Image (cartoon, coloured by chain):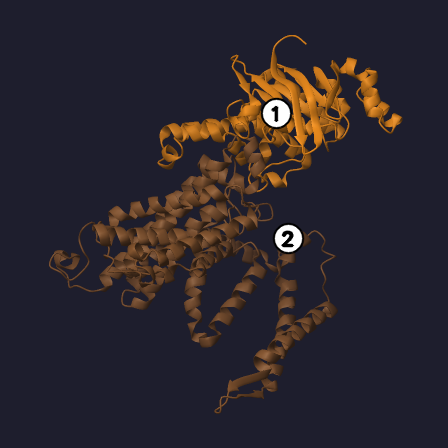
Amino acid sequence: MSGDPILTVDRLIMRFGGIVAVNELSFAAERRKITALIGPNGAGKTTVFNCITGFYRPSGGAIRLTDDDGRTMQLERLGDFRITKQAKVARTFQNIRLFPGMTALENLMVAQHNALMRASGLTFLGLIGAPSWRAAEERAIELARTWLDRVGLLSRADDAAGNLAYGDQRRLEIARAMCTEPVLLCLDEPAAGLNARESGGLNELLLSIRNDQGTSILLIEHDMSVVMEISDHVVVMDYGVKIAEGTPQAVRDDPKVIAAYLGADEEEAIAVMESGT
Amino acid sequence: MSATSARPSHAAQPSGSAFILKKALISAAVALVLFSLMIGVRTEAGPQGGLIYWTRFGDLAAMVGTVFGGSIIIELLRQWWGPVDKEHIVPKPVQAAMSFAGRWLAPALLVFAFLVPVIFYDQRYILDLSILVLTYVMLGWGLNVVVGLAGLLDLGYVAFYAVGAYSYALLATNFGLSFWVCLPLAGILAAFWGVLLGFPVLRLRGDYLAIVTLAFGEIIRLVIINWQSLTGGPNGVSGIPRPTLFGIPLDNSDDGLAARLGIDFSPTHRIVFLFYLILAMALLTNWVTIRLRRLPIGRAWEALREDEVACRALGINVTTTKLTAFATGAMFGGFAGAFFATRQGFISPESFTFQESALVLAIVVLGGMGSQLGVALAALTMIGGFELFRGFDQYRMLVFGIAMVLLMIWRPRGLIGHRAPTVFLERSQAISSDLVKEGHG
């Protein structure tokens, strides 16, 4: 691999007691590219995600993020919320985690917490209604409006997030992650539960995020039509180790990948691989 | 909670006379077992010191019959007016009238609150009761920040009330500081203790958090009882200075307010002053809370209540967010405590028992967690209503308890269960209580 990696995962190890969920995994995600992490169920993909986004502290190895200014941060040392706050890595969840009792707009406002906290002078300027705070709030609402528009939810801005349809909730979660203005967006199965038309729309959204925002994307996905169509680079995991990586085409034809997906059922593996074409 | 989760499966909801009868019979059987010893047999020490007893089966039968009938009535009420199908019980015109009332209720209450001392100037009892109600409104609004907004169940809120009260009492009696200097100090000290409590409980959620906060409330009380040299122990602190109108005392001395204004002195002046003081403090609490809700910190509190994991994924520092919620709530509790001390002129640990925490929490839950108006209404109902039932004599607690149970059946999420958005693009529409989370920790 050459070029300009935004994220470098170096010999990442994650143990839970005696179980090694991720074993010496190394891969890199290119800047302004879409990197997909695929693999059969239980391969350790979500564990890798949780390590990258600070929900788990890795047992070993390094995760380096180099932002657009060339600063390098060791994500495994930052941990927890600082990964989003300082390293600008945002994520979504496999099972959607919106704030259901808050409106779509409020969800996007919460995402801008850190920027708004500064603008509100740690609440004190905001409490007295300082003009600088009002201006910052206007800008935040404007950013939220832009993203609501881009995910096609502008008309639902004032509806409770919990009242939105499933596909809308998925898109709102991506919009919320984007409102943190990340350099790297990590999506955990964004197409899960979407119908064909919705996942087509998702592809367009992700491509436009890459092209227009210049945000790098790392995604876990089972839906091969999404993976094959939009990823620039695919990393295949099985039993916590990397078994292949390369372009979608190369990976799809890799016998090791087919074997991994074969598992118990050959038909299924072939069907999964074929569905991308 | 079970009522809401059962809602989708309408058919599964048991109904019909057989079910109601069965339930009533079971209740009656339980009542028979319980009351046969409590009411059926009466024992007393006889003149020779021996135990004599006699039976009261008539009373027992009446009691069991009441439980049987009451159970049927409650079950019928539940099925007709319960939350299961609340849609068709409220007709359209009533709904319109209620929404109209809802819009004007808060301003009307506010105007009424300002006029209370004018209307009831001669009725000392009502004035004292209003001051008490307003104190609980303020405590409710303070706890609402912690429980209602941030979703952190705090059973030891009275600890901060006590810290505030003792801060003022000790600072005023030992150093002669005035109420207006002590008030912010009491708030700061209470907030400090709020943070101190916050640190160890950061990792705890739900029931565990509730237990630790409960213990914290008790610890503060026990420290106050046992630290005799500082707090006077069970004897309390007496001779706490009365508040002054920025240095002008409200008494019948020559430089008192009455003398300066050239009017006749009346002890009611001080009561009226206290009334407006607590009204102003409560309104300040309300104003700050409403402002905070629309600031990033307030949204973070509510987001924390909704989903803590998602908050972390958005780069929100959960630790400081929780601590600020504890500190803010505690600060208002401290203010209220300082007011309590100056009103009473005497405080002792007896005023800061768990019962107070439970009462304030009940106000918040009954009002609808997170709703400012709901909390005010609940405080009015709980404190004022309790006084209202005084006529029922020894049945006061019973009537009050039944009223509470009925209210919770009718409105399981409190008087005002829905949530108003903090920001909107087109129109602000209330969010149904089904969607709003109660918080886990």
Q: Is residue B270 left or right of residue B131?
A: left
Q: Is residue B206 above or below residue B269?
A: above
What hue does chain B carry in this figure? brown
Observer-nearest residue: B309 or B229?
A: B229
Q: Do the dots labelled 1 and 2 sit on one chain?
A: no
Count of numbered labels shown in the rendering: 2
**Amino acid at the residue labelled 1:** Ile
Q: Mark 2 — residue?
A: B4
The disc at residue A52 is 1
Residue at 62%, 66% (x, y): give it. B77
The percent position of residue B124, horizontal first and vertical second, equals: 29, 67
**Residue B173 marker:** none
Of circles 1 and 2, which is in front?
1
- What separation in Å lies between label 1 and label 2 (alpha carbons)? 38 Å
Q: For label 2, count other residues whose C-alpha is less than 10 Å away and answer few (under 14), some (14-19) or many (20+).
A: few
State left or right for residue B335 relative to residue B257.
right
